[in-house]
């Protein structure tokens, strides 16, 4: 069965520190992978996506993610976190036909001064 | 460009009552999605439309939930009768077509008492 696992429910980092959010997926076919961010009172916003090609993808707000097929992972990274990055982050997987879209349970990020 | 519009933003009902949510996607977007996001969880896809046809409704509780997208534009999601466990945020999203970025609305927060 298709699923997305985000092992870390909550992460706290200091402003300026690096960040890595973990995402593991289980998918029978070639996955399309996404990271979304949800700020309090705001809708979900796409940070980046991977469909094919270069396994290191760049997104908005300085985020990047690396697709590792052998590890079934799609971890999100940022070299230097800003206080405004505090939010809920969701990893998602979809099929190449565009349906069967699954979100992980999310990782809540707190940024401390 | 106007975003995805949803109404109402908040709704409180008693169990066994019925409720309806409305979504107006971004103009020109052929694909429309309804998600249910229970507190502390990631969004769960309920139903996906391509124009006015259903692409995927495998996770829609069809005994109480129904959705339609007349004329391939606006969509309505209905719950009848509501249960306590239906308390959640209901998100609508749209995209140009399948596989394209999904744009999310602000959601409707439903509380069933």
Image (cartoon, helix red, strand yellow):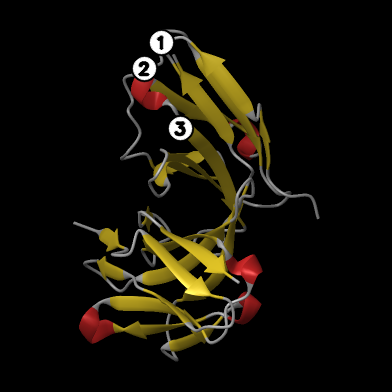
Disc 1: which residue: B15
* Label 3 CA crowd tier, 10 Å (few <14, some 14–19, many 20+): many
- Is the Cβ of the residue at disc 1 closer than 8 Å to that at disc 2? yes
Residue at 24 percent across and 66 percent down: it is A27
Q: Residue furthest front?
A: A113
The vertical placement of A110 against B3, above or below, is below
- Is the Cβ of the residue at disc 2 closer than 8 Å to that at disc 3? no
Disc on the earlier residue, 1 or 3: 1
Residue at 61 percent across and 50 percent down: it is A43
Q: Residue furthest left?
A: A1
Disc 3: which residue: B88
Disc 2: which residue: B83
**Mark 3 chain:** B
Q: Quadrant of residue B105?
A: top right
The vertical placement of B54 against A100, above or below, is above
**Mark 2 chain:** B
Where does residue A63 sit, x and y in percent of width and height?
Answer: 55, 79
**Mark 1 chain:** B
Of residues B110 and B1, the one drawn nearer to the viewer in this rendering: B110
Q: Quadrant of residue B47?
A: top left
Of residues A62 and A48, the one drawn nearer to the viewer in this rendering: A62
Disc on the earlier residue, 2 or 3: 2
Of residues A25 and B63, the one drawn nearer to the viewer in this rendering: A25
- Is the Cβ of the residue at disc 1 closer than 8 Å to that at disc 3? no
- Marks 1 and 2, Cα distance to the nearest angstrom? 5 Å
């Amino acid at each position: 069965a298709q699923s997305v696992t985000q092992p870390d429910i909550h992460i706290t980092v200091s402003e300026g520190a690096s960040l890595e959010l973990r995402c593991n997926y289980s998918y029978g076919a070639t996955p399309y992978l996404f990271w979304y961010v949800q700020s309090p009172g705001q809708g979900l916003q796409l940070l980046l996506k991977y469909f094919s090609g270069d396994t290191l993808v760049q997104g908005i707000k300085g985020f990047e993610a690396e697709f590792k097929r052998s590890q079934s992972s799609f971890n999100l990274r940022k070299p230097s976190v800003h206080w405004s990055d505090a939010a809920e982050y969701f990893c998602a997987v979809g099929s190449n036909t565009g349906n069967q879209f699954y979100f992980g349970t999310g990782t809540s990020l707190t940024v401390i001064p | 460009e106007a975003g995805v519009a949803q109404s109402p933003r908040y709704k409180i009902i008693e169990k066994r009552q019925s409720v309806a949510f409305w979504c107006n996607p971004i103009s020109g977007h052929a694909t429309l999605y309804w998600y249910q996001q229970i507190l502390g969880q990631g969004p769960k896809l309920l139903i996906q439309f391509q124009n006015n046809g259903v692409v995927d409704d495998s996770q829609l509780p069809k005994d109480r939930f129904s959705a339609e997208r007349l004329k391939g534009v606006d969509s309505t999601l209905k719950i009848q009768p509501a249960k306590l466990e239906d308390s959640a945020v209901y998100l609508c999203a749209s995209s140009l077509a399948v596989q394209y970025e999904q744009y999310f609305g602000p959601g409707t927060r439903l509380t069933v008492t």
